[in-house]
Amino acid sequence: MSDNRENTEFELDKKWGSIIKVGWTGVPNILLKEQGKLGLKALELNVLINLIRFWWVAENIPFPSPEKMSVEMGVSERTVYRAIASLEKNGFITRIQEEDKPTKYDLSNLIKKLEAIKEEIIE
């Protein structure tokens, strides 16, 4: 039996061609399918996906720059900061700020919300 990761990358390469070499992000389908049930606005989902894009290792909480995200998303910094504030207020993320370090974004609450929805779907 071959490594599942190799199969995934092979299939991604077959679908997307050489552009996949620039990188890809794994996002659980339940996040996309249940975005309405979760009460996520399109912009909030976009910001979440961008946060997930910087979460490479499970133990390392991502710390992307909202300024960089705003440029890449084509929106104002203020718009990204508002979406982050809303995500935090609604319990999807937790901002962690340490002196003289970039803000980190803990996504464990998002995972808990997705787990709860998964349990509802399975029951």
Image: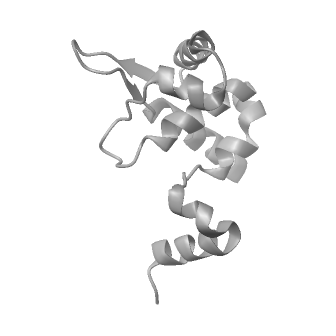
> Quick one: which residue is furthest to the right in this view?
36
User: What is the basis of the colouring in this image?
Assistant: one colour
Count of marks placed on residues: 0
Q: Nearer the viewer, residue 84 or 73?
A: 73
Coordinates of residue 83 in the picture (x, y in percent): 61, 17
Between 58 and 103, which is closer to the camera in this rendering?
103
Q: Residue at x 45, y 33 (%)?
A: 107
At a point 72% along the width and 35% down the height, the residue shown is 35
Residue at 57% x, 32% y is 48
Determine the image quadrant of residue 102: top left
Q: Is residue 63 left or right of residue 109?
A: left
The vertical placement of 108 against 82, above or below, is below
Horizontal and vertical percent for residue 122? 68, 53
Q: Which residue is more in the foreground, 7 or 119?
A: 7
Residue 41 coordinates in the image, percent (x, y):
73, 24
Whether residue 120 can be seen here? no
- Work out which residue is located at the far left of the displayed protein and give it: 99
Q: Is residue 95 depicted above or below 1 in this figure?
A: above
For the question of whether residue 92 can be seen, the reply is yes
- Rendered residue at 52%/56% (across/down): 22
Query: Which residue extends farthest bottom?
Result: 1
Question: x, y (%) of residue 123?
Answer: 69, 50
Residue 43 shown left or right of residue 25 in the figure: right
